[in-house]
């Protein structure tokens, strides 16, 4: 049986998971793939750390050239993460005529344009299934299974850590800090969780999906992004009272005025299937003009789920190398020119902290009316009248720019005692 040589850079959690599968499932993978994926060289700066796999003698190295310049290596796995030196290793591998598999969404979301064009010029394959949604085959779904479709919208829960935190806040009535600590103690939230909490990890993944769908590179920095740090248990309670759950959503939507991309915590009606995606799970709800609505669901992180996607890229690329197939384009609509829409429409949730005095609600309503924002429902909880009380408002569909201007005017009123909390609604327009 023919062999395909694999070199791995980055022998961390995911790298060790991939190496273990390549070694322990070698026979099974070879039978299924029709070739032997042979692990030739594994590179890491730490040769001592215990890992859940023992490598054959002599293949672990500190020298990247043992992977990048090794003539027996045909596919390089870049699993170190971060921007540099990962980006340089990836480019070097392509220049040396090697195909690459990466899980590095931060790198793709910052430098995707030059990586994709370097891969195209080299004629080598670049696989990145593991960069979005861990085990979920979303890249294959978009590039192959749904190739005949125009994708009109995509709503993704793309970060397991934040989904776990929001679920525990609601179900165990924990604060965000306590839910985060449980996630960290269980080992699936990073010690520095800022990429997750800020929504940036989700926007990295949305950037990759947007490139696939639109054929145009939208770096994560161009995607409006809000995280979950400002979400309180109080807001989750009010949302539940109104019939909604709160999820950190990454959204791609083609509307009348063009394409919008954004990541933010959103209220989702309880009847929508995405509201049942709990804990560390990820899900991607997409609409194609032929298939209609589809949902992909699965584990978005972790050693085995992510390694499973890396192996899937290795097998597809190995087969393509052996039959001499050219790489598929990186997007399903190559070359299409698109502008990002900067002002989108949505329904909104506001929580005002207002003094319980005559005329305050009227002033708020007056300002909302002035900006053409229509109130759909309103709840005020009776609390101590001398203190600020929460006034929760749901609006009908309004323009983001008008909402921002109205909230800024309302927050300047003397009767408003803290910054208004603003969340958007999804699937309820
Ligand atoms: N930290 C991510 C998450 C996994 O919690 O989903 C890696 O992107």
Image (cartoon, rainbow, N blue to C red):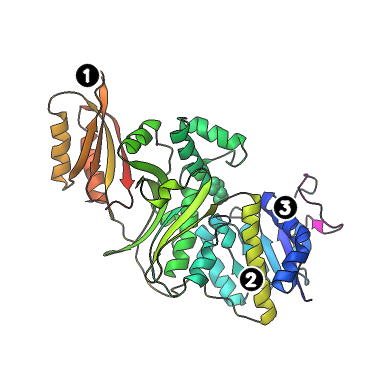
Badge number at residue 316: 2
Q: Is residue 389 visible?
A: yes
Segment tinted magenta in the rendering: 48-63
Is the CB–ligand 1 distance for label 1 below 8 Å? Answer: no
Number of numbered discs visible in the structure rendering: 3
Label 2 Cα neighbours within 10 Å, binned few <14 / some 14-19 / many ≥20:
few
Depth check, front residue: 397 or 295: 295
Where does label 1 land, which residue? Answer: 385
Q: Is residue 74 visible?
A: no
> Residue at the spot x=47%, y=39% of the render?
167
Q: What is the CA distance from the residue labelled 3 to the residue labelled 1? A: 60 Å
Is the CB–ligand 1 distance for label 2 below 8 Å? Answer: no
User: Quarter-wise, where is residue 364 in the image?
Assistant: top left
Residue 200 location, x and y as percent? 47, 49
Q: What is the CA distance from the residue labelled 2 to the residue labelled 3? A: 21 Å
**In magenta segment, residue 67:** no
> Residue at the spot x=16%, y=40% of the render?
367
Where does label 3 land, which residue? Answer: 16
Q: Is residue 420 above or below residue 374?
A: above
Mark 3 element type:
helix
Q: Is residue 239 above or below residue 109?
A: above
Q: Main secondary structure of the magenta part?
A: loop
Q: Nearer the viewer, mark 2 or mark 3?
A: 2
Taking the view exactly as shown, the residue that stands out farthest to the bottom is: 324
Q: Is residue 112 above or below residue 332?
A: above
Closer to the chain start, of discs 3 and 1, is 3
Residue 416 location, x and y as percent? 23, 29
Label 3 Cα neighbours within 10 Å, binned few <14 / some 14-19 / many ≥20:
many
């Amino acid at each position: 049986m023919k062999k395909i040589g694999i070199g791995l850079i980055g022998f961390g959690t995911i790298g060790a998971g991939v190496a273990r599968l390549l070694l322990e499932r070698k026979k099974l993978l070879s039978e299924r793939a029709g070739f032997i994926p042979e692990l030739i060289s594994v590179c890491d700066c730490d040769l001592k750390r215990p890992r859940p796999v023992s490598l054959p003698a002599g293949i672990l190295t500190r020298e990247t050239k043992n992977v990048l310049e090794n003539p027996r290596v045909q596919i390089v796995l870049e699993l170190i993460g971060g921007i540099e030196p990962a980006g340089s290793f990836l480019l070097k591998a392509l220049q040396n005529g090697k195909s690459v598999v990466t899980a590095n969404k931060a790198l793709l979301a910052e430098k995707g344009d030059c990586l994709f064009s370097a891969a195209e010029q080299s004629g080598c394959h670049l696989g990145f299934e593991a960069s979005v949604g861990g085990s979920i085959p979303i890249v294959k779904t978009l590039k192959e299974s749904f190739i005949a479709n125009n994708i009109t919208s995509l709503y993704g829960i793309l970060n397991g850590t934040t989904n776990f935190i929001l679920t525990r806040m609601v179900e165990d009535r924990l604060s965000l800090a306590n839910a985060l600590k449980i996630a960290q103690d269980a080992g699936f939230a990073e010690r520095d969780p800022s990429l997750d909490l800020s929504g940036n990890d989700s926007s990295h993944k949305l950037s990759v999906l947007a490139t696939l769908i639109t054929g145009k590179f939208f770096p994560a920095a161009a995607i409006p992004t809000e995280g979950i740090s400002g979400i309180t248990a109080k807001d989750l309670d009010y949302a539940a009272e109104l019939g909604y759950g709160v999820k950190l959503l990454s959204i791609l939507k083609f509307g009348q005025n063009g394409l919008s991309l954004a990541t933010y915590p959103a209220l989702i009606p309880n009847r929508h299937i995405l509201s049942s995606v709990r804990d560390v799970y990820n899900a991607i709800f997409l609409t194609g003009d032929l298939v209609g609505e589809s949902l992909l669901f699965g584990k978005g992180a972790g050693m085995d789920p992510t390694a499973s996607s890396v192996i899937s890229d290795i097998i597809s690329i190995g087969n393509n190398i052996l039959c001499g197939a050219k790489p598929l384009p990186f997007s399903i609509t190559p070359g299409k020119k698109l502008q990002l829409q900067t002002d989108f429409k949505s329904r909104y949730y506001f929580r005002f902290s207002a003094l319980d005095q005559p005329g305050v609600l009227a002033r708020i309503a007056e300002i909302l009316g002035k900006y053409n924002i229509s109130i759909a429902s309103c709840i005020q909880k009776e609390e101590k009248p001398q203190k600020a009380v929460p006034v929760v408002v749901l609006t009908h569909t309004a323009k983001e720019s008008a909402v921002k201007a109205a909230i800024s005017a309302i927050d300047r009123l003397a009767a408003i005692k803290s910054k208004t909390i603003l969340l958007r609604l999804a699937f309820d327009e």
